[in-house]
Image (spheres, rainbow, N blue to C red):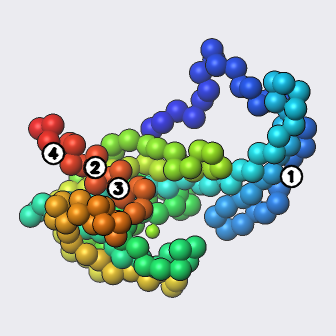
Amino acid sequence: MLSTAVPMEIKNPENVVLDHKEIYNGIIARLHVDTIQLPSGNKAIREVMLHPGGVVAVPVLEDGRVLLIRQFRYPLRKYILELPAGKLDHGLSPQDTIALEIEEECGFRAAAIDYQCSFYTSPGISNEIIHFFIARGLSPVAQSLQEGEHITVEALTLDECLSKMETGEIADGKTILGILWYLKKLNVK
Ligand SMILES: [Mg+2]
């Protein structure tokens, strides 16, 4: 997993916090607005959305196709194509969380789930970190969507994924990273 520690030799240039406000403490997100002092002495505002972190996976079928979900996303007011993913809010490890998400969202159980990397989704405004896995050895189980999840599952070839990235039909950041990472892994072998 990615270390969140700041290396000792790099001094934090924004460690003088003059004012700290918690604007919102919600189910998923907390929003903080801090006033800080820059090294010049000038003040600046830092808006921070604290997030519990999440997981995402490329689930690979025996025939090489990958599973994506078409999911309604309220902030966008539309359905988008994404890899299965979820938040770290069950008290489970990242690996157990993504195993559960693949079962619940896609209706498949994975025999092997291999950790690949972790990445920050939007470090200018949030501490959200996503842990990424490749899942293989899939066998069907019952899909179990929660209320408020509007999801259908699609199996796509990698060529289909790439062309949907070109057209913009796949425009979710973690999904683009996951597909390209998986392609790179295949080509390295
Ligand atoms: Mg999800």
Circle 2: residue type: Leu
Label 1 vs 2, first from the N-terminus: 1
Is residue 25 in view? Answer: yes
According to the image, label 2 marks what residue? 180
Q: Is 141 placed above or below 117 here?
A: below
Label 1 SS = strand
Q: Position of residue 95 (x, y in %)?
A: 39, 52
Q: Is residue 173 left or right of residue 22?
A: left
Q: Using the numbered discs, state the Cα–Cα distance from disc 4 to disc 3 in whole angstroms.
A: 16 Å
Q: Position of residue 119 (x, y in %)?
A: 46, 44
According to the image, label 1 marks what residue? 21
User: Regarding ligand 1, which quadrant of the image does it lie in?
Assistant: bottom left
Q: Position of residue 132 (x, y in %)?
A: 38, 49
Q: Residues within 10 Å of mark 2 (few under 14, many from 20)?
A: some
- Mark sitting on residue 176: 3
View extreme (top): residue? 9
View extreme (front): residue? 167
Mark 4 or mark 3, which is nearer to you? 3
According to the image, label 4 marks what residue? 186
Q: Position of residue 1 (x, y in %)?
A: 45, 38
Circle 4: residue type: Leu
Residue at 81% across / 24% down in the picture? 39
Q: Using the numbered discs, state the Cα–Cα distance from disc 1 to disc 4 in whole angstroms.
A: 47 Å
Q: Using the numbered discs, state the Cα–Cα distance from disc 1 to disc 3 in whole angstroms.
A: 35 Å
Label 2 vs 4, first from the N-terminus: 2
Circle 3: residue type: Ile
Mark 2 or mark 4, which is nearer to you? 2
Q: Is 46 placed above or below 54 here?
A: above
